[in-house]
Image (cartoon, grey):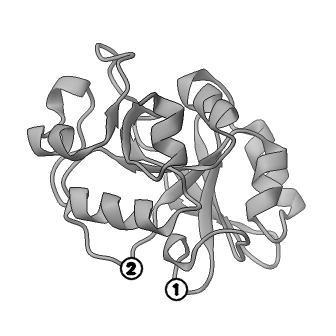
């Protein structure tokens, strides 16, 4: 089965995201979130970041994009994740308790192209067992993760990942709150 088929059928992939090696899959499938929780040994209830390929896709999954968010995304040089207060067209398992969702518009590279071709948003979480160090290279990924995913992307294995994305939240008054720098 090819990569796109695995994604479309609710499989979990190991892929080079725009930041680190990540576990992912179709963010619109609740079972993908559950499978990733099992692989990472992560307790349920903590949602993952979702990657989209462009502004049109972002608007399919967010109720409202404030002007401050558009501006922050447009100006960002490094990967930037924005927590939006209200999501739509996503399963409840993808949302925080307050209904918010963390989404990053991937502007270039393999992950961007993959999302475009798959036509669905991808879950993005580091490829580590919960509580263990985040692997910066493919060779640092835990063997149990390699055994449990449905598909491993065979690109950029020698590339060293960069730090995780910056995460911000736009407050009601337009103020930007940094959650992770």
Left/right placement of residue 130 relative to residue 46 reads: left
Q: Give the residue at mark 1.
A: 97
Where residue 5 sits in the image (x, y, percent)?
A: 51, 37
Q: 39 and 103: which one is in front?
A: 39
Where residue 54 sits in the image (x, y, percent)?
A: 77, 40
Q: 31 and 154: which one is in front?
A: 31
Residue furthest to the front in view is 1
Secondary structure, mark 2, is loop
Classify the position of the N terminus by image quarter.
Answer: top left
Q: Give the residue at mark 2.
A: 45
Dots 1, 2 in contact, CB < 8 A: yes
Where residue 146 sits in the image (x, y, percent)?
A: 19, 37
User: Which residue appears at 32% of the width and 21% of the height?
Assistant: 160
Looking at the rendered structure, the number of numbered marks drawn on it comes to: 2
In the image, residue 175 sits, relative to residue 121, either above or below, namely: below
Local crowd size for mark 1, using a 10 Å CA cut-off: few (<14), some (14–19), many (≥20): few
Q: 33 and 165: which one is in front?
A: 33
User: Which residue appears at 82% of the width and 57% of the height?
Assistant: 59
Secondary structure, mark 1, is loop
Can you tell which quarter of the image residue 119 is in? top right
Of labels 1 and 2, earlier in sequence is 2
Q: Is residue 146 visible?
A: yes
In the image, residue 97 sits, relative to residue 142, either above or below, namely: below
Can you tell which quarter of the image residue 34 is in? bottom left
Q: Is residue 77 visible?
A: no
Left/right placement of residue 82 relative to residue 60 reads: left
- Dot label at residue 108: none
Left/right placement of residue 120 relative to residue 21 reads: right
Where residue 177 sits in the image (x, y, percent)?
A: 63, 66
Residue furthest to the right in view is 67
Cα separation, mark 1 vs mark 2, equals 8 Å
């Amino acid at each position: 089965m090819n990569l796109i088929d695995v994604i479309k059928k609710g499989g979990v992939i190991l892929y080079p995201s725009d930041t680190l090696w990540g576990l992912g899959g179709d963010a619109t499938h609740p079972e993908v979130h559950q499978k990733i929780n099992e692989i990472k040994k992560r307790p349920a209830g903590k949602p993952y970041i979702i990657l989209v390929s462009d502004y049109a896709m972002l608007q399919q999954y967010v109720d409202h994009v404030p002007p401050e968010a558009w501006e922050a995304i447009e100006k960002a040089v490094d990967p930037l994740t924005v927590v939006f207060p209200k999501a739509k067209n996503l399963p409840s398992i993808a949302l925080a308790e307050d209904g918010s969702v963390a989404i990053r518009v991937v502007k270039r590279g393999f992950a961007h192209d993959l999302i475009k071709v798959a036509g669905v948003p991808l879950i993005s979480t580091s490829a580590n067992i919960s509580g263990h160090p985040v692997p910066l290279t493919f060779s640092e990924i835990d063997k149990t993760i390699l055994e449990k995913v449905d598909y491993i992307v065979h690109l950029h294995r020698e590339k060293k990942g960069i730090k995780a994305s910056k995460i911000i939240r736009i407050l009601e008054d337009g103020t930007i709150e940094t959650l992770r720098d």
